Each structure stands twice: as structure tokens, then as C-alpha cells.
Amino acid sequence: MALSPIRSSSFSSSAIVALAVLLLLTGTSSANLSKNFYSKTCPNVFNTVKSVVKSAVVREPRIGASIVRLFFHDCFVQGCDGSILLDDTPTFQGEKTAAANNNSVRGFEVIDAIKSEVEKICPGVVSCADILDLASRDSVVLLGGPFWKVRLGRRDSRTANFTAANTGVIPPPTSNLTNLITRFRDQGLSARDMVALSGAHTFGKARCTSFRDRIYNQTNIDRTFALARQRRCPRTNGTGDNNLANLDFRTPNHFDNNYFKNLLIKRGLLNSDQVLFNGGSTDSLVRTYSQNNKAFDTDFVKAMIRMGDIKPLTGSQGEIRKNCRRVN
């Protein structure tokens, strides 16, 4: 009988050790990311990425917002692994045709162009996942936003997850505040991160299908603002579905805090925008960002870095794709 407690104690100690090892391994992948990852293997990657992004943004400022959104949609499905970039094939289903992405996400050609240029100077070294993160940062900077050093060292997935992309892990534009907080928390991001990242709607456009219900049926919207959007977005489904409106009506091609100022006067374009300032728990933070652009920039940078840390593949995991649209 005296041996029983000893066995129990031994088992508990082993379990604790095993749990500690598991917890250590859980953070290993993101811990392997480094701001200096390519300092020796591809030091010119930064100028190369920026050059291509700059040309694309000069041609079409909206593409900067599209690239940031592409990064967000990639990270939320199975981590920041470039899976969203993979094309469908007869034997492979990617994520591009999932409900959250189909006829919506864009910017793939810019990532292709960057990859082509990077491969010329450093073949087989820089992942598509890292290129997407760098291109997102450069898009923000080129359109007036803050600079930050990107943590690098991700590898590319050999898989995609259509089911996850198609079943709500990416919050839809109809989301309420609870859903937004929950979806971001599921990715290890706080409500503060969520509000800051929502500020990326300071640039870019949305399709009529994303805001039709809001401008015709909701009451927490400025009437003049709603009527102006109705001119380009008919009430009837199937009519003008792809017509576009600016997410930020003040400075649609500039990264600033006007998005939050718009919410204070009920001029958020999407339901998922206006719920951030609608008598809920995030009202005070929206007000802070509307009054303090530096506070918004600081929190946005922190949130982008945290989002970039979501389940990266590192070390010998995954691969470095030669072509971002298909596995090697």
C-alpha cells in the first residue's frame, strides 16, 4: 500500500515534464522567426520586394490594401504559410474559391512578380509566405503608414484548407462584435489587436454584396452616407453586386486614422466596421484611435507582428516554393 503514493507521485512528475515539453514546443515555430533571417542568404530581398510593390501601388493604390487583406486571409486559415496562394488543380483544392475569398481576394499577380524577381537574386531561399508578409508591410508604408521590421523565416505549406476558409474562420463583413472578438481570439489575438487590424480598412474598397444590407436595412448609419452608397449599389441581389465603394470615404488611398473618425459619425461601410463603435466594449478604443494616430500606428504594428506569428512553418517543415501558385 505504501508503494501506491510513490507511483502516483512518479506519474505526476512525468506528466508535468511532458506538459512542460509540449508547452515549449508549442511556441517553437514562431520563436524561430527572426528579423535578420535573410541577412546572409538574401540581404537584397527587402529592396527587391519594395521595388515591385511600389510599382504596383503607383499603378493602382488599391492593390496595397488588397495585399494586406491577402496576408490576413492567409494567416487565419492554417497559419501564415502561403496556402492561400496555391491554385486549384484537378487533384488539389486550394482556398481561392472558398466563400471568403472567391471573386474577392486579389493581388496574386503582384506576389508572383515579387517571387520572380527574388528568385533571380536568391533562388530557392525566400518563401512565398515571407514575401507576402514583407509585401504587406511595404504596402502600408508606401501608402503613408508606419514602418516595422518583419519577423522572417517562414516556409511554405504543401497543403491548403478549403474547408476552414469556407466555414467562418475568416470573419465575414456581416460579423457582430462578439463574433469578431471570438474569431480573433481563436488565433491568439486580443480584442485590441482586432480593432487595430480592422483599421486596415483605412484604405481599399469593398463590393456591393458586402454592404448592401447595411446601407438599406440598418439604422446605425448616417442617412446621407447610406443614400450616396445606394447610387452605386442597387437593392436587388444580383444587380451591381461587384460595384465598389471606398472603405474610408475620406482618404481611401492613404493609411491613417480616418477610418476610426468615420465610425464616430456612423459612416462605417461594413457592418463589421460599425460594430466596433456601437455602444459596445470597443467604443473607447475606437475613440482613442480616432484622436491619436500614433496610438493607432503603434498598436497596428504590434498586431501585424502578432498575426504574422500565427502557426508559421519553420525549420524543415513545408518547403520553399519555386512558384507561389503550386507546390514543388
Image: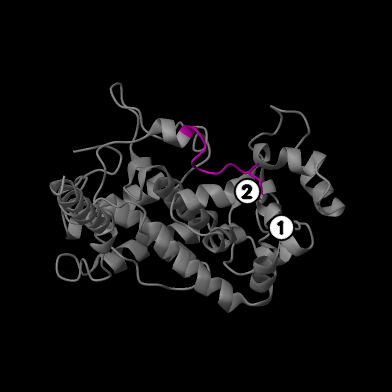
Name the residue at 40% across, 35% down.
95
Please give the residue where the numbered disc 1 appears in the rendered image: 280
Q: Position of residue 280 (x, y in %)?
A: 71, 57
| Crowd tier of the residue under label 2, counting other residues whose Cα lies within 10 Å: few below 14, some 14–19, many 20 or above | few
Question: Does residue 223 appear to the left or right of 173 in the view shown?
Answer: right
Q: In the rendered structure, which amino acid carries the disc numbered 1?
A: Gly
Which residues are drawn in magenta?
166-176
Q: Position of residue 256 (x, y in %)?
A: 60, 69
Residue 171 belongs to the span the image colors magenta: yes
The residue sitting at the right extreme is 223
Name the residue at 17% across, 46% down.
4
Q: Which mark is residue 178?
A: 2
Marks 1 and 2, Cα distance to the nearest angstrom?
10 Å
- Vertical arrangement, residue 62 with respect to residue 292, above or below: above
Question: Does residue 303 appear to the left or right of 40 in the view shown?
Answer: right
The answer to whether any part of residue 145 appears in the image is no
The residue sitting at the front extreme is 1
Q: Position of residue 184 (x, y in %)?
A: 51, 52
Callout 1: SS: loop
Displayed quadrant of residue 158: top left
